[in-house]
Amino acid sequence: MSRFWLAALAVAVTGGSAAAQSPTQRGDYLVNSILNCGGCHTPRGPGGAEKAFSGGNVFDTPRFKVVSSNITPDKQTGIGNWTNDQIKKAIMHGVRPNGVALAVMPSAFYAGLTTRDADAIVAYLRSLKPIRNEVPAPQYKEPAKHEALPAPGKMRGKVKQGYYLATIGHCMECHTPMEKGQPLLTTALGAGGREFKGPWGVSKARNLTSHKEKGLGSWTDAEIKRAITQGVRKDGTKLNPPMGFGAYAKMTDKDMTALVAYLRTLPPKE
Ligand code: HEC
Ligand code: HEC
């Protein structure tokens, strides 16, 4: 098979919008839409956008106190000296070059990234402007662990593409109830209930399953898309953070349609 056809096939499998997209463009699209890496790695608050991806957000829990890393190519304070493989290992396996496991990075979800997409993410990170921003060292009170995701059932076409996007978008990390710091992915996938505290008060991740009353079973596709991309509920009221509505709004319509098609297949849960 010629290189052209291999590339075309990869686009068909991963749903790329244009065959002409370079790895850096593909990485830009993924990182700034469905992956929303900046949601954790871009400093929150005013001036954050100018320091995009330079880290500094604090995650303080009983098990660890960590600060999101500077993932710009700055050599002293970012990942400028890391090899491509070291960067991919941190993203997809949650392990730093020194062997220490990352706690907050949703790596179990990134483990399923296709090689093409993982390489595209690295290419994009390398293309960023290096920003000097030293973040404090993490404190782990117990070793971090990442549970493997359950194997997906048989899926094809649009639903399979939507499953891929929902996975790498780690939707289910927030939308699945937790036990001992790990989401109950096999028994309560998408059932919601996790609480997020912030300046907005407390928001509770919603039930995304096809349950008619508790989930999205009675929502139209357009209502689901509006919730994801504009942060608006079925009844028209505004959803609170921390979901990355602005990033998700940058998804292509094809990817958004696939994502919704997958959500429709989630078995109803109370
Ligand atoms: C839920 C928040 C969150 C998301 C989403 C997230 N990260 Fe992270 N990431 C962190 C935190 C916090 C750390 C460092 C501490 C830890 O996790 O133990 C980290 C560490 C890293 C590291 C290791 C750098 C170092 O110096 O140790 C890399 C590389 C990285 N992230 C890249 C990414 C990329 C690329 C994405 C998007 C695909 C992403 N992260 C999404 C929170 C996040
Ligand atoms: C960082 C955590 C987080 C991530 C990641 C996340 N969500 Fe959410 N989501 C929430 C929270 C919290 C709410 C409820 C906010 C509120 O009620 O104010 C919500 C609400 C929603 C709603 C509205 C449902 C309703 O009943 O109002 C939909 C639909 C949704 N999320 C889908 C998704 C999809 C699809 C993804 C992945 C692309 C995703 N979410 C990723 C936290 C998250």
Image (cartoon, rainbow, N blue to C red):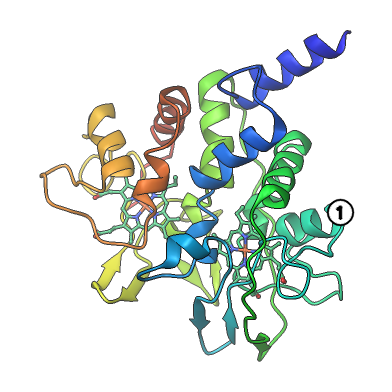
Q: Where is residue 16 in the image (x, y as percent from the top left)?
A: 60, 24
- SS category of the residue bearing label 1: helix
| Left-right relation of 54 to 192 | right
| Left-right relation of 110 to 225 | right
Residue located at (57% from left, 62% from top): 53
Q: What residue type is labelled 1?
A: Asp
* Disc 1 C-beta below 8 A from ligand 1: no
- Graded by Cα atoms within 10 Å as few (under 14), some (14 to 19) or many (20 or more), the crowding at tag 1 reads few
Q: Position of residue 140 (x, y in %)?
A: 67, 87
Q: How many marks?
A: 1
Residue located at (59% from left, 46% from top): 168
267 or 123: which is nearer to us? 123
* Residue 248: quarter of image: top left
Q: Tell me, yes or no, if residue 81 can be seen here.
A: yes
* Residue 267: quarter of image: top left
| Left-right relation of 251 to 227 | right
Q: In the rendered view, would you say 137 is above or below 32?
A: below
Q: In the rendered view, would you say 109 is above or below 123?
A: below
Q: Quadrant of ligand 1?
A: bottom right
Q: Tell me, yes or no, if residue 217 can be seen here.
A: no
Residue located at (40% from left, 24% from top): 253
Q: In the rendered view, would you say 225 is above or below 135?
A: above
Q: In the rendered view, would you say 75 is above or below 192?
A: below
182 or 58: which is nearer to us? 58
123 or 141: which is nearer to us? 123
Q: Position of residue 79 (x, y in %)?
A: 75, 65
Q: Where is residue 233 in the image (x, y as percent from the top left)?
A: 19, 47
Residue beneath disc 1: 85
| Image quarter (top left, top right, bottom left or bottom right) of the N terminus | top right
